[in-house]
Amino acid sequence: MGKHELMGQIPLEEEFRGMGAIKSVARRLLHAVARYLPMFPSWRVKLHRLRGVKIGKGVFIGSDVFIDNTYPDSIIIEDFVTIISNSFIIGHSFVPVHLRRVLQTEDGEKRGVCLRKGCYLGARSIIMPGVTVGECSVIASGSVVTHDIPPYSVAVGAPANVTRTFDMEDVDW
């Protein structure tokens, strides 16, 4: 079998060979359970922590939330974050071998996502790799976040843009 036959045009990284492949399968099974089975949101948080996602206290994760399968440990979710159903948090991107010159960015490969304390992701929002959503920021339902969102902001659209800001005093902790 050729080098790319098992993975198509995505190179298989060394960490996903041998025992790494077994760990990856186990993480994906935990992910499937967390996404699809009815349960208390606190149980979802525990399952994602087992997968390697760094999650603070008081976090709400709704049903059918996708949190990066390949590098769950690249995701940081700080205290009191709310993630509503059907949202996607994508912590990495792989560039197909044949399109590297077309898709490679000046920044290189972006990896990881950071959701700062108290931010809110509306239903069906998508957070792309390399993004930080600022403290207490609100991402509107259906938005696609492709760049950092500053603290105390409301971002809307695809790609998401800040439509308004608010003050720290507007937040009731």
Image: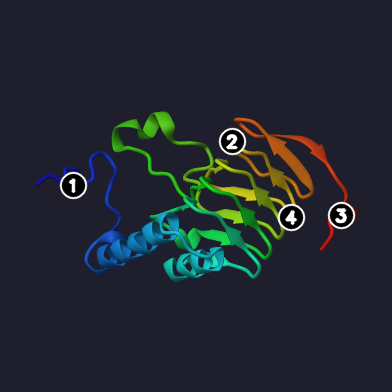
Q: CA distance from mark 1 to mark 3?
A: 50 Å
Write down the residue under mark 4.
135
**Alpha carbon of mark 3 to alpha carbon of mark 2: how far?**
25 Å
Left or right: where 167 falls relative to 19: right
Between the C-alphas of marks 1 and 2, the distance is 34 Å
Provide the secondary structure element on which disc 4 rests.
loop
| Residue 150 position within the rendered picture, expressed as x and y whole percent measured from the top left | 74, 46
Residue type, numbered disc 3: Met
Nearer to me, 106 or 25: 25
Residue position marked by numbered label 2 in the rendering: 142
Badge 2 marks a residue whose secondary structure is loop
What residue would you read off at disc 3?
A: 168
User: Could you tell me the amino acid type at mark 2?
Assistant: Gly
Q: What type is the residue that disc 4 sits on?
A: Glu
4 and 2 marks in contact (CB < 8 Å): no
Which disc, if any, is residue 6?
Answer: 1
Which comes before the other along the chain, label 4 or label 2? 4
Q: In front: 131, or 81?
A: 81
> Which of the two discs, 4 and 2, sits closer to the camera?
2
